[in-house]
Image (cartoon, grey):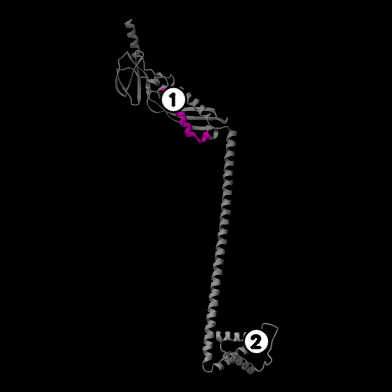
Amino acid sequence: MMLRSLCRAGGAILQTQRTAPKLWVTPAQQRWASSLPMNTVVLFVPQQEAWVVERMGRFHRILEPGLNFLIPVLDRIRYVQSLKEIVIDVPEQSAVSLDNVTLQIDGVLYLRIINPFKASYGVEDPEYAVTQLAQTTMRSELGKLTLDKVFRERESLNANMVHSINQASDDWGIRCLRYEIKDIHVPPRVKESMQMQVEAERRKRATVLESEGSREAAINVAEGRKRAQILASEGEKAEQINKAAGEAQAVLAKAEAKAEAIRMLSVALTEQNGDAAASLSVAEQYVSAFSKLAKESNTILLPSHTGDISSMVTQAMTIYSRLSKTKPRAPAQVLEEKSEEAQDQSESPQ
């Protein structure tokens, strides 16, 4: 009996190298796991690989990278797991959104084996299990969102996918690192309606922007007119003030000039030959006034002696002499005269 078991063990050692079943393989990548090595007592495990060793059909230990020793016949390398990051292409699948729109969606899954023991004994086909889990999780997550939110919230959708996959794949010794959506295909009619919606939204934005521009332009024009009217009124006010001030200054200047002329004339008349100068001035004014007759109006008033200038000058000088000889009376004399007149009036009836 012992001899038969030794022969079987020796036959197992001498048999040719067997290839491992395909693990984590996708049709596009055609990636194959390392073949199962033979037990040669002294083994060298490559970096980022974990070899699962069984002793007499039972899990014994996991070989670390580097030099390792095994017992022939009793120990056997059962699984070879890669600890590198693995990329799995999730096939395209159909899903229904919250607003009953059928979508065709595919993605890429990035994961890593963190526990070779669970990855070897926890699930029969890790690739199939993770792929099916990603598809079912994607369907459930898409069913919670409307079509518009699917395109706007891709990052949150990817994060929810990673969280859901990690909750289920923890027993398999697998950690999902990322999930990225590659393409989202919508039905042609829905795509046309989306394009029409986008065009309508853009036209709406253009109309709103144009109306806002027209409103801002009208407001600016009204503000400009208001400011222009205010500035014009202020300018007119300042102009009237300046004009009034100028007219007042002109009146004052004319009055001061006239007063100065009168003072100078009075001084000149008190000097020697002042009467002769006054006569000459009156004669000149008479001649000047007589020359302007019938120029501004059809009505003419002629003096009785138009040809006797000397008599008119003499008459004017006589009036001037009489006015110059009269002196202003004091207020006391005026009061006395008024009181005397009142007494005369009171005595007259008696």
315 vs 128, left or right, is: right
User: Which residue sits furthest right?
Assistant: 298
Residue 223 point in image, percent of width and height: 56, 56
Query: Residue 167 got which mark?
Result: 1
Main secondary structure found in the magenta portion: helix
Query: Which residue is under mark 2?
Result: 347
Query: Residue 187 got which mark?
Result: none
21 vs 243, left or right, is: left
24 vs 55, left or right, is: right
Label 2 packing within 10 angstroms: few (<14), some (14-19), many (20+): few
User: Which residue sits furthest top?
Assistant: 1
Q: Secondary structure at mark 1?
A: helix
Q: Who is closer to the viewer here, 201 or 250? A: 250
**Quadrant of the image containing the C terminus:** bottom right
For residue 75, what is the image quadrant? top left
- Please name the amino acid that badge 2 sits on: Glu
